[in-house]
Structure formats: structure tokens, C-alpha cells
Image (cartoon, helix red, strand yellow):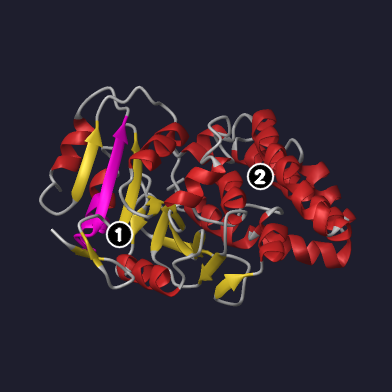
Amino acid sequence: MNIEHPDGTERNTPWLTVIMPAHRGERWIEATLSSLADQADDGIELLIIDSSPDVATAQIARRFSDRLSMQIQEHSPLQSWQSKTNHAATLAKADHICWLHQDDLWLPGRAAAIRNWIRKAPEAALHLATSAIIDGAGRRLGLWRCPFKEEGEIEPALFVERLLVQNFIAAPAPVYRKDAWLACGGLDEELWYTGDWDVWLKLAAQGPVHHHAQVTTAFRIHASSLTVTGSRNIDDFERQMRIVLDRHLPRLAAADSSTAARVERASTASIKVNCALAAAWAGGWGGSLAAATSLLALGPADLLRYMRDSRIVDRLVPRLRAKLTGSL
């Protein structure tokens, strides 16, 4: 079957591959796959890498076999979502890839939007977009936005400068070129928490980055998510973030040492705030004084930089709402 691609040509290959790393996903995956199937686009390939010890997740997925072009690898020996994603990327038949975790959603019009993004900027290594934040019941709690007013191509140094302060990209939103992913090495499988932050920075070194304000995905927050459970180990949580900063800051420093120094201060404060918030979420207040001191030490200009680039309000308010309603 020939499939129309974003450039207007017809080929017998998918135009987009969606990667879904799965593990015991039976609670969420039906809604997730339904949101993908509702796009009604035959040119999308879905690769599910499932490490569940039973068949419950795969059985639910197979209910969509008449609406989705999918491959399911059951009982995968790969345990982390990073290793599953890297493996699936090598199998992808499409030139462009995105991932959709088992608990997140596509919103109506997502496929059409991605087609348009690729048609307008096929050379982009990475497309970014705003994402909604939802709770376990699917109620919208807020928006997770990127700190760019303009749409279209983002100046490379500006992208790195702002992203180094804090990962402001919701995982289900980006779309990237397969060749750029393979060239940058994909996800660092040692980074259980910051692997996505690291790979966005690596992809940006492979080609243009384009930003879109359109909201086409929903990122779900719930008590059993990896970001909630994993952040309880505060020392490792901090180490994960510090690795990304130390790895990519030299790239910025080589171009502008003064800006790099300011970004490092803002990022260090962001790391301290993230650790303090994680400790508070777990019932403790360790690190709160250090976080407050770091923020005050920034001074007015760099505090504004932190507030803009960390997206602290976008990230924190939905979680507080979920906490107050008992859904987190």
C-alpha cells in the first residue's frame, strides 16, 4: 500500500514511527492507543517493546490491530524505557520518530500537525511543542510550555542556553529525524531520569530545532510514574541532573563564556530547587534552605532567567492541583 508522505510523495513505507516502551501498562495503555488510533492515519507505524511478565498489556494492544499498524515485541529482556526506545529506533521504518509512553496521550489533530511540521521543515532534527498536563483520570491540570515566544526555527545557541537551565520539554511532544537520532547515539541508558533532557541537547547538535505552540499531546502525572518514584533517591536524582549540565555546558562556554557562567548558576539553582521539591514530595524538607539561598544569590536578572527557563510554574502548579485533589 502506498502512503502519502508529508512531502507529497507516495511510498510503501510509513512516514512516522511511534515508539512505545511498555511495562505492566494495562491500567493506561487502552486510552493511550485509542488516542493514537483516533488519528485515523494509516501512515503511522507503532512499535511496542513490552517487558511485562504477563500478556495483559499485549492483549489490550492487540485489540487495536485493525486500527493501527503495529508490531509488538513481548517479554522483552530490555527493562528500561531508554533501552527499549534505543532498540526500537533501529527498527523504525520511517524517517521521523516520536515516542509515546503507555500513560500519555495524543490529542485530536496531532498526526495532521506533525505532517505539517515535517512538510514545512523536513531538515529539522527536532520539533518541539507545548503539551497539556493531565492527572490519572485524564483531567487537564495545565500546560507545559517551552520558553520561546516565536514559532519556527530556534537559534541554536539560544536553545542550548535555555534548555541547560531545566528540561522544559514534555516527553510525548517532540518529533525527531531518525538519522539525527542514530548519529547522536540516542538515549544514554545510564540516565534513568535525565536521558530525555540529554538527548534533546544531543539532537540539537545534529540540525535545526523548530518550536510549535500547538498543543497536541497530554503528559500524565500520577503516583506510580517514574518521575515520582525515582526522584525519591535524592542523591541519585541530583547526580542525574548534574551529569547533563556538566556534559553540555562546555558547548555553550566555547561560544560565550559569560553567558555560560550565568546559565550554570541558574541551572545549579534549578537542580537545588528540584531536589528540595522532590524531598518535600517525599515528606521531608531537606535542601529547602540551600534551594532558597541559591535562588536569592542569582540576583534579579538571573532569577528572571530561572523563572522563564525552568518553567517552574508550568511544572509545579499542575502537581499541586493533583496533590490537592488526591490524584497524586
Mark 1 Cα shell of 10 Å, populated few (<14), some (14-19), many (≥20): many
In the picture shown, does residue 253 fall above or below 29?
below
Given the image, on which type of amino acid does mark 1 rest? Trp
Query: Disc count in the image?
Result: 2
Badge 2 marks a residue whose secondary structure is helix
Residue 105 at x, y percent in the picture: 34, 55
In the image, what residue occupies the spot 66% across and 56% down? 163
User: Can residue 26 be seen in this snapshot?
Assistant: yes
Specify the quadrant of the image occupied by residue 218: bottom left
The residue that disc 1 covers is 15
Does residue 38 belong to the magenta stretch? Answer: yes
Q: Which mark is residue 188?
A: none
Given the image, on which type of amino acid does mark 2 rest? Leu
Q: Taking 155 as reference, is 228 left or right?
A: left
Q: Nearer the viewer, residue 205 or 150?
A: 205
Badge 1 marks a residue whose secondary structure is loop
Residue 234 at x, y percent in the picture: 66, 32
Q: Nearer the viewer, residue 171 or 314?
A: 171
Dot in front, 1 or 2: 1
Sequence-first disc among 1 and 2: 1
In the image, which residues are magenta? 33-50
Specify the quadrant of the image occupied by residue 92: top left
User: Can residue 284 be seen in this snapshot?
Assistant: no
The residue that disc 2 covers is 277
Does residue 231 belong to the magenta stretch? Answer: no
In the picture shown, does residue 273 fall above or below 7?
above
In the image, what residue occupies the spot 39% across and 42% down? 89
In the image, what residue occupies the spot 57% across and 29% down? 190
In the image, what residue occupies the spot 46% across and 45% down? 328
Q: Taking 243 as reference, is 259 left or right?
A: right
